[in-house]
Image (spheres, rainbow, N blue to C red):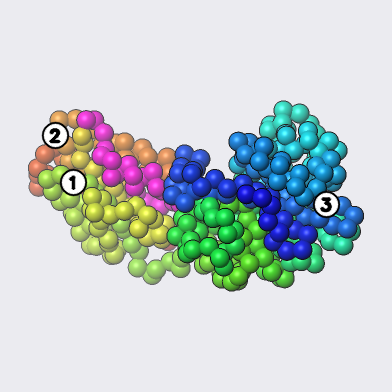
Amino acid sequence: MHPVEITDGVYWTGAQDPDLRIFDVIMHAPRGTTYNSYLVQGKQRNALIDVVKASFTGPFLENLGRLIDPASLDYVVVNHTEPDHSGALAAVIETTGSAQLVCAKNARRFVEGLLNRDVGPMQVNEGDELDLGDRKLRFIIAPFLHWPDTMFTYLEPDGILFTCDFLGAHYADERLFNDQVDDYSHEFRYYFDIIMRPFKSYVLEALDKIEALDITMICPSHGPILREKVDYYLRCYRDWASQPTPDAEKRLLVFYASSYGNTARLGEEIAAGAREAGMSVGIFDLNATKPEAVVDAIEAADAVAVGSLTINGDAVKPVWDLLSSLATLNLRGKVAASFGSFGWSGEAPKFIAQRLGDLKMKVLGEPVRAQLVPTAEDLAACRDLGRQIGQAVAAKT
């Protein structure tokens, strides 16, 4: 694509990557993505805000050259140094010659790691400004959204906020603007869940910092530019990042994968014991449950119990799918337990317990394991485990 003017003297100069299907290993991108970069032209000076992934360097420099002589570029603002936004940085610096690189103070080490040299970047603090003549860039430090180096750049008097990953989405569309593209609400929420969810407190902190700004447009680094319903998108992030109000009734969620019903019976007994201890309980068969449908419930719950049969010395895929989806949640200190039936080896519950512990959960005792059909003693042990879960949760309050 050629550059696109988004308002007088401000241009999108990024790259479209519609064929991408997996982003950074962890994210699906069925609609591809964009690497958004923006050129701001002032009467006296100009600034480039973020660059693009290294593989798009050539077209990106061609885009920039259609607007200005690259040697006349005054500033290159790096809102976030992750390589999808900074891959072309070395080429830009070499091409522009004397452009001053601008970044947050704690981004300097990342810049040096990218370029393998010190380019003497201008390191800015909260509220620092760059005067472009008739316009100013004001910097808002926004750490851990989603790296420690992140900042936002606010353009005055236009009211445009450049947010890098914040409020972005993996969604490629040449129409660029949120009021012109098709509905991408799923991609917008999915991006928050995977990228921003682990940093909810920082999301709220950043929203508080920008609340008083007169924002007419938000220009993220991925996906559509937000020029309509800006308040709606900000409100979505605030709602999603707000911690759920704790229920008066403590809640246990029991998840299991079971071939012949034996692991399911163990889970039901754990649930019964937890109810006896005064907890409410939800039980989920992982063969019929998508992890993305329960992550909110898990984060809000007080305790989790996960069970699996053992096949080939391991827990089964639906269980690992659930456990791998928990990496973006704040689970520290939640009570957890594992269980499962087995034929001859029975490693699955031990592996589950280890993973739950790695997620900083408080794992109770040894996993309950039953060989083939659970005995009365096995079922009693599970009911007792449910009671222990209830007691452990009560002891935390």
Name the amino acid type tagged 2.
Answer: Gly
Mark 3 near mark 2, Cβ–Cβ under 8 Å?
Answer: no
Disc 3 crowd, CA 10 A, few/some/many (<14, 14-19, 20+): many
Residue 243 visible to the viewer: no
**Nearest the camera: 288 or 333?**
288
* Residue 46: mark: 3
x then y, percent, for residue 128? 82, 55
Side of 14 relative to 260 (left or right) = right
Side of 46 relative to 160 (left or right) = right
Q: Which residue is mark 1?
A: 258
The residue depicted at 84 percent of the width and 57 percent of the height is 42
**Nearest the camera: 197 or 360?**
197
The residue depicted at 27 percent of the width and 61 percent of the height is 282
Could you tell which of marks 3 and 2 lies nearer the N-terminus? Answer: 3
Helix, strand or loop status at disc 3: strand
Mark 3 near mark 1, Cβ–Cβ under 8 Å?
Answer: no
